[in-house]
Image (tube, grey):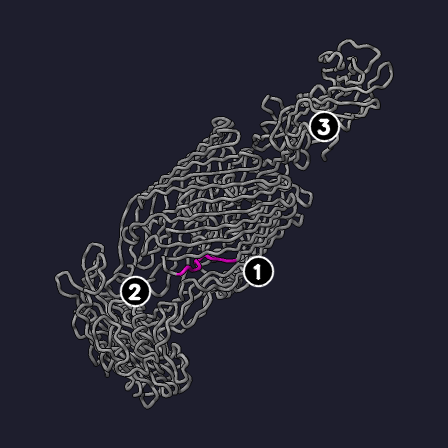
Amino acid sequence: MSVKPREASAVLRAVVAAVAWWSSSCSPSGFSAQSLVQSVRILASSADEPYARPGDQVHVTVLAYDGRPADQRQGAPMNLTWLPGSGSVVIPCINPPDDAYYGCFSRFRSTASAVSPGGLQDAGADSAAPVGSQDAAADSAAPVGSQDAAADSAAGVALPVTATSEFTMPLDVVTSHPPVAGTSPYGLAYLFNVACAGQVQVVPAGPNPQQAPIGCFDDAGNALGSDEYVFGFTRVYSRLAPDGGYYSNANPVITGVDLPPCTLAVQGSVPSFVAPPIAALCIPSSCPRVTIGAIVPESSWELNPLNVDSNGNPLHEEIWADYYATFGGFNSQTRLLYDPSTGVVSGSDTEFEPPTLGPSDVHDGFIFAVVYDDRGGESWVSIPTHVCSDPADPVCAAPSCADGG
Amino acid sequence: MRAPRLFTSLSLLVAIAIGVIPAQLWAQVSPPVSTTPPVDASAAASSGTSDSVASDAGARDVGIGTGDAGTGAASTGAASGAASTGAAAPSEPSISLPVPLNDRGALYPKQALDEGFDETVAVSLILSIDATGAVTKAAVENPTGHGFDEAALSAAYGLKFEPATRKGIPIASRIRFTYKFVPPPAVLSGAVRTLASDRPIAGAQVTVRDAAGGQRSTVTDDEGNWRIDNLGIGTVHVTVSASGMAAHESDETLKPGQHENIVDRLSGLAPAVQLVTGADGGVSEVEEVEVRGVRPPREVTSFTLDQSELNRIPGTSGDALHALENLPGVARPPALSGLLIVRGSAPQDSAYFVDGTPIPIVYHFGGLFAVIPTEAIDHIDFYPGNFSAQYGRAMGGIVNVGLIDPKSDRLHALAEVNLIDSRVLVQGPIFDTGWKFTVAARRSYIDLWLGPVLTALKSSVSVAPVYYDYQAILERDLGTRSKIRFAFFGSDDKLAILLGGTAATGAPTVLAGQLSTHMGFWRAQGLYTNRIADQTELRVVAAVGEDYASFSAGNIFFNLTDWPITGRAEIAQKLDKQLTMNVGLDVYYAPYELSAQLPPLPRPGVPPPGPLASQQLLQTQSDGTLYEPAAYVEWEATPWRGVRIVPGLRLDYTQATGAWDFDPRIVVRQDVTTSPRTTIKGGVGLFTEPPQPQETNAVFGTPGLVSNRAYHYDVGVEREITRNIDVSVEGFFKDLDHLVVQGLGNTGTGVIYGAEVLLRYKPDAHFFGWLAYTLSRSLLRDAPGMPLMLSEFDETHVLTVLGSYKLGRGWEFGARFRLTSGYMYTPQQYGFYDETVGSYSPLDAYPQFSSRLPLFHSLDLRVDKTWKFRWGTVGAYLDVLNVYNNANVDGIGYNYNSTLSTYVGDLPILPSIGVRVEL
């Protein structure tokens, strides 16, 4: 018996259908990508000295965004808070046990609770004690940046929030760290920040040593979840170099945005850059992907003195970019820009996938590209983005390079 | 059917022939009457030889002393005071002695039996007999003790005599009357069955030889039973033989009045091919592969499965090693994981062997099939715990796969085709050289159809898994006492997952391009056994080979190759009838090469690595040698009836740690009853396991490690309920310490405890099945001061019920139902945002593995159909896993910030079909 081509095709289709059904019964369902920003989010944090010297004044800038619908934003605006801190000064946690961020929690909780059992929101200017080893002033949580979050545009589009605080790297940050065999002396500072569309309060300790010492609560005292609350942390190191000095690192520089055939120039300075608006036309019959990528000059690809190859040759930094958007998505969120040994990576742009729109629908929002190096360096660029479905929409006309390049 | 009467008569004749029953027996037939005249008529005249028989053969459990009046002495009265012995003196014809009328003898006293007394004893009594012939007084002349005096007196008062007469007139008399107590004979009975399938063997020859060279023989009846009565006490040598089966010999120590029942299980001379009468009256040929679930004699637990069960268990696709998963103490492995979780231990804590040679893996990718197909397996020994000192370097269980002995009668061939793979096997004699061979091979062809299907599905992932295995055996018997065998076997698994699109964009993410694994092994093995003498047996197995494992994903790779040289030699020396000593060496020597390029472990003083693999890959290239010699000694003692005590000592050296491990162990089994058999059992032992090679690696490991350690405690009982049904219950406790914890060292401790129940119906002509239930708890502590937490491999409840029924006409239907606790997992919650690398760090539940996935349950069905032809058989099967497509859960997945989760499903309904041809 022979099988005719059409029959074979039917058999194949049946097999394919069966396999598809079968495989679907044991596959996890899909989740929204991390790149889609539709909640309160902290997107990046950058210290002007990722490797600082003891005694240096370090400035830390954080990028946050409130991606919630406009009505929710106006009802409970997002506040960005350093823990603990006062004004623009943040109190770092120095050298926690095992260099683990949650090693700071017990210090933080015991100190803060002792001073202000009621929680941080009630704390006076002097309520929150320092959790670091240095003798910084005992200041309270310092809300910063919320004034920016309130500055929404008339169209109801939230604007990115950036805020900068500073701290002094303690003089004993290195000497107070337990020595680690095979590693040159170093110290570590953790900085904690909270994006909360409510009030930050100290919460009782539980059996889990990783449990956060604070929570975000609404006016009724209900704990808020991931849509309204992010508890973030960043690290700043201080490490002795073989020559007796200290290691240093510069944050990567973003010189433009690649939007073939255009290259958009950006404004701003490290770590925060802003690109000119871009637009995309997405009609049901044609919704092309938009190739986009952050441009980082080779000068940012520094030598990494703490990394050598198998032959002992020094390597450079690894530099990569994470992409976020307030709508749509990307075919790949994380892209490598510079390989530690081979350098610049060609084809490292990603593809933005605009959302499907109904007739006459438009979307306004942002694309963010956060660029990292593997020594704690970080910078970002915010790209205002307009997506429409009406070919007559003048903003959605075919991209020209007039705005940037 | 047995004919007890005939059997008794025959036994009696045999007993006479071998002198068990003394000649006095025949005196009873016509008791001599003493003619010694009593001088004093009022005094007793003792003589007479009234004799009583020592019982018939039916009185198996008691002994009877023989009343022996007048064996000599005849009192002639006070006047003369003389006593004559020996031949009766001439007597006055006017006087006659009393003659016993009802002498039935006296029972060999129970007290004496209990005290182990087994001698012939004579007790003389002085009896006063009145003129009516009644015994009015009895006195022991020389007390003996041990209950003999009381037994003689009790019997004497029941005697009735024909009174003494003088000139024809009855008169009172006094006589010496002697009871002779002969130890009661023993009875030896038993059953002869096949080792593999426990089927009775009719017509087997059973020969019992006593120490003096006396020999008794019989044959088994239709049910395989046999019995020999009236055996003398002491040690007898029992030889059981049957056509086509290997003879079995044993020594049994018989005590007075003892009824000893023994069961001998014979194995086939060649791989057992038995003709089994099917339900339809036809004769089917069933190849047997024996799986000894647990019991060689040195271990605590025991049960036997044969391949006629194994390749018919639903849900296993006929794979023998998968049948292990249905035994008590074995947890349900994660789907397609190929892991064997024994009594709550981690998979790496169990070890796998082929005829004593260690092998690295037992399953092909994902555990679909074993690396050695069922057709090449003769038996599988599985020891879930408290195993013999001959095995070491493991804290969990032991699996030892025995390869088949090639058939010697003619050439045989087998081929099987299913959706996953195809296999062939050829075996038989090599002309008339005395050598015989087996050649087998198997290859999968998933790659031939899965790739096109995924392509048609427009999947961005294409998978190309390929596996194959092979076995070659060359064997020759060197006389009747020794055998030599060469085997070459191996396995190879390749898996390549091509990630479409990623490579084309030129974006080298961690999984860019191809993810591939390749692993396998081969062994060239020599095995030599020699029964050097009746009391001495030698077994040597040595092997060389290669293990290889490689993994690559983008620019990450890991390659490990080693060339193990292993040897095991054991001498079993019977030191005494009740003591055997096994002394052995167990050597593992493996040069290795390792090369790897892996993401580094988090390094102090620098930020954590980002999400991309190109960052700071850590390279290592090294070679070295693993050298782990060991020696052990073990004794098998049977100091009294029904007991087996097996103490053992094992000494291991691990070069990687420079540490010596000394492991004492002991196992005790005691038969409480013999028919039906009830056995209580227990064991305790120390089991050490060296750290895994990667744990002692200079780059990735932890310095200063020593071996992991576990104390095993077992206690249980086995009971035969009927000939086909038995039940076993066992409790176990494992105390773990010195466990290696990454980054910490030997800081881990733990306890694992539980109970196992197996209710089994052994195969008969129609049905086999069992119910296995395990209740257990596995708890670990990473370091002092940390909480004791459930281990990742804790499965509290594991219930398996399975059965298979032959419907006739070649049809057979089987079902398996499994109900088990879900796997442990560590829940994650929304946690923290790590701004340095741009990812969320979840808040892991504390302690780890604090939650359990939902209950697992699944019904598997199997239908077999066999067609018989003159040239061979053709079989087909349909094996359906998870018939009602229950959405079982195998794991849990989280979104990027751990706010959403979903279950990862276990296998959905999965049919498997196959066709098998045997010549």
- Residue drawn at x 53%, y 52% as measured from the top left: B755
Q: Give the percent coordinates (x, y) of residue A18.
A: 52, 64
Q: Is residue A240 left or right of residue A71?
A: left
Q: Quadrant of residue B62?
A: top right
Q: Which residue is mark 3?
A: B153
The quadrant the C terminus of chain A occupies is bottom left
Gap between marks 2 and 1 measured at Cα = 42 Å
Going by the numbered disc 2, the residue's amino acid type is Leu
| B655 versus A151 height, above or below | above
Residue A157 circle label = none
The answer for which chain carries disc 3 is: B
User: SS at mark 2?
Assistant: loop
| CB within 8 Å, label 3 to label 1 | no
Going by the numbered disc 1, the residue's amino acid type is Val
Q: Which residue is mark 2?
A: B612
| A289 versus B311 height, above or below | below
Going by the numbered disc 3, the residue's amino acid type is Leu
Q: Which residue is mark 1?
A: B883
Residue B663 located within the stretch drawn in magenta? no
Magenta segment, principal secondary structure? Answer: loop
The answer for which chain carries disc 1 is: B
Q: Quadrant of residue B231?
A: top right
